[in-house]
């Protein structure tokens, strides 16, 4: 049972603890190795890995460095367990600059998703298994809507 003011890990904290346990198993890391990696004691790390308490943001950032990911990339992998083992980048990275009150946001690196996704069709029909007919249907309806919307369009 947790002691002090911090309760058991729940929500994102519990998901992160589960991710750490999975990485430990896959990489054959001990609690001592994770503790050393995040710069904390074995007992501190143990109660967090077991979900008795939550990791801190500092712990999260340190663990991201351990697994050679940017924190935002680690967050996506924690939230989408099916993508945890994906070898590419899931999150694009951006650069933000300001000049006299103007903010410029520029994408500096794209995510690198698979070249083709045969599993889903997004759009009017929500998310469902794809087929060539479904793809043609979405495209045809989109083309008709586009023709109707462009009567007053001047390039």
Image (cartoon, rainbow, N blue to C red):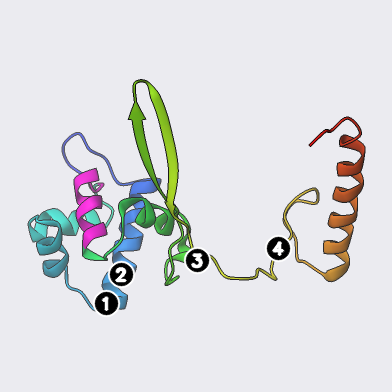
Spatial separation of the CA atoms under disc 3 and disc 2: 13 Å
Q: Could you say which disc has been placed on residue 82 in the image?
A: 3
Q: Residue at x 46, y 60 (%)?
A: 90
Q: Secondary structure at mark 3?
A: helix
Horizontal relation, residue 151 to residue 76: left or right: right
Q: Could you say which disc has been placed on residue 23 in the image?
A: 2
Q: Secondary structure at mark 1?
A: helix
- Category of crowding for the residue at label 1, using alpha-carbon neighbours closer than 10 angstroms: few (below 14), some (14–19), many (at least 20): few
Q: Residue 64: within the magenta?
A: yes
Sequence-first disc among 4 and 1: 1
Horizontal relation, residue 37 to residue 142: left or right: left
Q: Is residue 81 above or below residue 101?
A: below
Magenta span = 54-65
Q: Residue furthest front?
A: 155
- Category of crowding for the residue at label 3, using alpha-carbon neighbours closer than 10 angstroms: few (below 14), some (14–19), many (at least 20): few
Q: Which residue is mark 4?
A: 120
Marks 1 and 2: CB-CB under 8 Å? Answer: yes
Image coordinates of residue 27 in percent, x first then y, are 27, 77
Marks 3 and 2: CB-CB under 8 Å? Answer: no
- Category of crowding for the residue at label 2, using alpha-carbon neighbours closer than 10 angstroms: few (below 14), some (14–19), many (at least 20): some
Q: Residue at x 31, y 52 (%)?
A: 71
Q: Residue furthest top?
A: 101
Sequence-first disc among 4 and 3: 3
């Amino acid at each position: 049972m947790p002691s002090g003011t911090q309760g058991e890990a729940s929500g994102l904290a519990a998901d992160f603890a589960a991710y750490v346990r999975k990485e430990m198993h896959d990489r054959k890391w001990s609690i001592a190795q994770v503790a050393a990696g995040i710069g904390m004691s074995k007992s501190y790390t143990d109660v967090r890995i077991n979900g008795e308490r939550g990791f801190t943001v500092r712990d999260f950032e340190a663990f991201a460095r351990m697994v050679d990911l940017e924190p935002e990339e680690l967050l996506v992998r924690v939230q989408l367990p099916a993508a945890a083992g994906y070898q590419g980048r899931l999150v694009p990275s951006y650069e933000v600059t300001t000049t006299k009150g103007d903010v410029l946001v520029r994408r500096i690196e794209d995510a690198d998703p698979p070249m083709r996704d045969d599993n889903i069709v997004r759009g009017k029909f929500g998310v469902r298994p794809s087929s060539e007919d479904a793809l043609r249907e979405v495209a045809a309806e989109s083309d008709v809507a586009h023709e109707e919307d462009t009567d007053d369009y001047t390039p």
